[in-house]
Amino acid sequence: MCRHLAYLGPPVALRTLLFDAPHSLSEQAARPLHQAPGRVNKDGWGVGWYSADGTLAGQYRTVTSMWDDSEFTDDLVTSGAFLAAARLASPGATLDPTGNAPFRVDPWLFSLNGYVKDFREGVEGELRAALSERRRDAIVGDADTEVVFALVLDRLDAGDPPGTALADVIKRITAHCDAKLNLLLTDGRGVHATRYGNSLFARATTIASEALDEEAGWEEIPEKSVVHLDADGYRVTSL
């Protein structure tokens, strides 16, 4: 099912939220408190981060589980905006770094915590057929997340605001099949997320699958909601 988070606030070291917090993303990947189905997000992880001017500054993806990864050496990297995800691959998906979130199409980073049911039993073809040629041809791997991201990009290209684009894609996919679609999207200036089928929490600077600590300020987001996070904090609306 995956665990993911996005941060937008004063610059912090990436590892503060990824590895050092009491219930960091790495801890959530290994020992999630709210995840269903699937219990161990062992199929790799990734992170993308932005520079102070809002441009994408770096990306790292690997098929090594977070708790076993000794290759991530950007311990001193700081950023005021980043998105990270730990992966539990959908059945039949190729285990390759290109299949791991965050997926990147400048200026956007994207992650899916969930799955598209029957994706490899016909739904994938139906969703790909709905894509513009430009977005369909840009798909690299076989992950359902990348196809979902392409659908979102098509809506953004059409002029939809990010939250509207996410909600529209959820409606489109669930018209074909059952799905769990906690989506997470950022351009480094705002974060947009949905809760649709799995846990989601937010505080003034962070949206995450699970709270990173027991400090005050975390709110569990209601099911079937859209969350928008910017410099003024976060707000929640109904899908």
Image (tube, grey):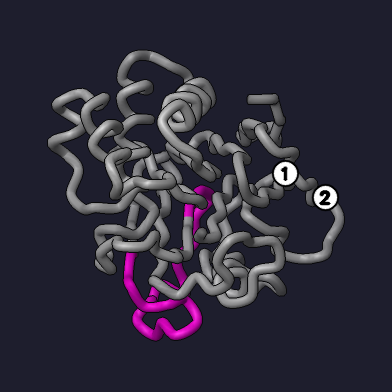
Q: Please provide percent x and percent y for residue 195.
A: 62, 40
In this picture, which residue range is highlighted in magenta? 61-83
Residue at horizontal 13 percent and vertical 36 percent from the top:
137
What is the C-alpha distance between the residues marked 1 and 2?
Answer: 7 Å
Left-right relation of 193 to 69? right
Q: Which mark is residue 204?
A: 1
Based on the picture, tell me whether residue 110 belongs to the magenta stretch: no
Tell me, for residue 196, which label it has, or none: none
Q: Seen in the image, is 147 located left or right of residue 4?
A: left
Q: What SS does tag 2 mark?
A: loop
Position in image of residue 200 (x %, y %): 67, 48
Q: Is residue 63 magenta?
A: yes
Quarter of the picture holding the C terminus: top right
Q: Is residue 211 left or right of residue 116?
A: right
Please state which of residues 103 and 50 is positioned toward the viewer in this rendering.
Answer: 103
Residue 104 visible in the current orientation: no
Q: Amino acid at mark 2?
A: Gly
Amino acid under disc 1 = Ala
Q: Crowding near pointer 2: few (<14 within 10 Å), some, many (20+)?
A: few
Place of residue 187 in the rendered image (x, y in percent of width and height, measured from the top left): 43, 37
Q: At x 57% / y 38%, what residue is drawn? A: 193
In the rendered image, is residue 26 in sight? Answer: yes
- The kind of secondary structure element at disc 1 is loop
Question: Residue 92: where, in percent of width, then height?
Answer: 30, 62
In the rendered view, tell whether residue 18 sits above or below residue 153.
below
Q: Quadrant of residue 39?
A: bottom right
Q: Which residue is mark 2?
A: 217
- Mark 1 touches mark 2? (CB < 8 Å): yes
Image quadrant where residue 15 sits: bottom right
